[in-house]
Each structure stands twice: as C-alpha cells, then as structure tokens.
Image (spheres, rainbow, N blue to C red):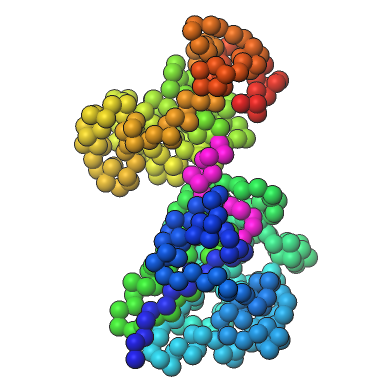
Amino acid sequence: MDRPNILILYTDQQRWDALGANGNNDIQTPNLDRLATEGVNFSRYFVQNPVCMPSRVSFLTGQYPSTLRITRMGIPVPDDTITLPKMLRNYGYCSANVGKLHFLPHANRDHRQIHPDYGFDHLVISDEPGCYSDAYRSWVEQKDPDQLNYISVGLPPATAVWRQQMGIQDEIPHPEERFPKKAIAFQGSSDVTHTAFVTEQTIEFIKQQKNQPFLCVSGYYSPHSPWVAPQEFLKGNAINLRADYHFNEERVVHWLQDRMVNLLVDQPISLNLLKYFKKNIAQLTVNINDSFTEEYLKQVASIGIHLEIFCEKEEELADVRFKFFDFSVEQNIFKSKKDLGDDLNKFNKNTLFLSGKILLSEGEKYSCLEAKKQKNVLTGEPEIVYDTKDFWKELDHYRLFNTL
C-alpha cells in the first residue's frame, strides 16, 4: 500500500479568498499559489464551526462538533478522542504537531505542564505567540534571548484577567493593545517570529523522518489578529527617507521617531542608532561606496534590519560582489540600480530629503509651505527638502509628512 507523507500547513483565521490563487490581487501569497497551481484547490470546502477549538477538533477527528459535544471555546478535548494521528499510527506513521493545536483552553493553565499527546508522537505546542512559557518562548530563549521582550502579540483578554486575579507576573512585557485595527510590524528580528519558529521546527521534524511515513501538522498562528508581520513586509506603508546627501545623523533620528521608514544612505549610520530604531526601519537601502566595510554590513544584517545594497553602475556590480564576497554568499542582497527598478524609484518621488535647499524644477526655490502647495512639478508631486531649523519647526507644526 502506498503511504505518502502528509504535511498540513494550518493557518489561522485565513479566509478562502485571502489567497492570490483565489483571485485576491491585494494579498501576495506566491508559495501557496504555487501549491494550488500544482495540486488541487478545493472550491467547496467548508469547516464545521466558525470558532477555533470546535473547528480544529472536528478537522482532526472527522466528526461534527455536535457529535463531539464541543461546540464552543473553553471545552478541553478528552484525552481518548480518536484523532487522525491515532488512526495513522496503525499504518506505521510517525506524527507531529508543531505550533498551534488548541485542544485545551490556554488562558488559565501552566503551559509548562505535560500536554496530552492526542496520538501525536512529537508535540511542539505554542498556541499564542509569546504569551506563555511554552515551546516558542523556549525556542527564542535558546536562539536569541535578547529578542524575548519583542515576541508577544499581547495577552488574550481572558489570560489578562486570570493573571490579574491570580497575581501572576510575567517575565516579559506584553503590548497593551491586543487587537489594533491595522497591520503592525513585529518588534523583533524576522528570524524569531512565531511563523519562523513553526517553519524551522517543521523542517527539523521532516529531516528526521527517514524510515517511515509521517504526518506533520504545522499550526501557524498567522494571519490571526493582531496582524503582526515582519517589518520588511510592511515597507510599502513606510515613509521613504533619503539621507544620502550631506548626511546628518541628528535629522535621521528626528525622522525615525514613531514612524516606519524606508531609509536610503550612502555612508554608514551608527550601529547603536540602528539597534535603537530597528523597529522603525522597514528597509535600509545602501548606495555602496568605499566608506562601507564587510564587517559593518554583517553587523547591520545581524541586527535584523532588512538590507539591500546597490551600486549606481551595472558594470561595477561584479567588483562590489567580489569585495564583499563572503557576505554576499550569506545573503542575496546585492543589486544594481537597474535590478532595484521600482524599489529605488520610490526614493525619487514623494520622498523626504534630509539636506540641501528646496529645489523643485529649473532652479526655482520655494519655502517649505510654498513647496507643499506645488503640484505637477516634474514627477507630479514636489520633492521637499529640509535644511534649516526653521524648516524643522514648520514641519513639526504643519506635519507636512502626512500631506505628501
């Protein structure tokens, strides 16, 4: 009998139409689209319950929630429930659940206690990102303990109430706003997100399965609210900021306060500044020259900032790659100006410059407020350049950055 390996990529709160393959032009899901194209995309598949716990136990048992008598949240799944991994065990399968399972209420229990296996041979359970002392938090602690303060998406309301009543103090901070109504940037490095955790642990399990078929359920928390994404995926919502003429670090600091920025530079920025403001830098684009060293670029990458390096001339790209050869092997981030295309052009339109005088077209000079009012100049919108302290005062008073 043919016994294929089974990998279930189980996302949370993702509608059927939140896929490019199903006609959504706003949500980019190229890898899932490829799976749909090369496999089968079910158009008449329905879960049996809109609520998390009943839906999940129905999916992994093949029974209706009403049959299981689990029709709402907060009902623990009995240990002896017949599940898919229990049935597959009879056919020689090794099974695993990595990430979210949600067969137990998770608000009012200690996540360090032994979890029922429900027929799984391998359990790496984490039902919420960073909220509990669980497998995900332990993984981050081993991988990069400095990131622990950035991994929580906020406590679920029931958890917050229970901890307050029980007088439980957690060792890591949790955002106060649990359900913001917009996407927010993950505060830590992209390699320690809950999604990265599930993916890495899934790959590790699969690599270990050599002599028997396997079932692996990869329980991804995303895109469950709050909508937390790595900073590089939110760069399109960031302000484009050029700091590559008459560089002034003090002005960069001014602009990195409380906003997301795509930053273009042509000389090194203080590593301490980058570390401090890394949550505000969606992307750092480096116009490479002799002032940069391989060691500096490695340190920038190690901070967790999305980095792109380009050189103005196509013919110089090979020399740049050679100079930073070891680094380029680690990350494919070297591009020519031509390669960057629209990504670089974004810095040439509706962009805030941090130097020089206000110069729009044909040598005409304007004040800040006059520049704000100009329309259809060259690219259709004025490029606004700030120079003196008076300009900064005007900027803060009129908040011109919101009008670009």
Q: How many marks?
A: 0
Can residue 225 be found in the magenta stretch?
yes
Is 3 part of what is drawn in magenta? no
x and y percent of residue 205 in the render?
A: 39, 73
Q: Position of residue 37 (x, y in %)?
A: 42, 64
Residue at 33% from the left image edge and 46% from the top image edge: 331
**Residues rendered magenta in the picture:** 224-238
Quadrant holding the N terminus: bottom left
User: Quadrant of the rendered structure where residue 118 is?
Assistant: bottom right
322 relative to 21 in the view: left or right? left
Compared to 236, does 223 lie above or below?
A: below
Q: Residue 167, how many percent across, how many down?
A: 74, 63
The answer to whether residue 137 is left or right of residue 4 is right
Closer-to-camera residue (290/4): 4
Residue drawn at the location 53% of the way across and 60% of the way down: 22
- Which residue is more in the foreground, 32 or 103? 32
Residue 358, image x, y percentages: 54, 12
Q: Relative to 9, does residue 195 appear above or below in the rendering?
A: above
The reply to whether residue 208 is in sight is yes
Q: Residue furthest right?
A: 165
Q: Is residue 142 visible?
A: no
Taking 315 as reference, is 82 above or below it?
below
Q: Residue at x 30, y 83 (%)?
A: 211
Position of 277 relative to 400 (above/below):
below
Quarter holding the C terminus?
Answer: top right
Residue 339 position by quadrant? top left
Identify the residue at image location x=68%, y=83%. Answer: 65
Locate residue 298 relative to residue 186 in the image: left or right: left
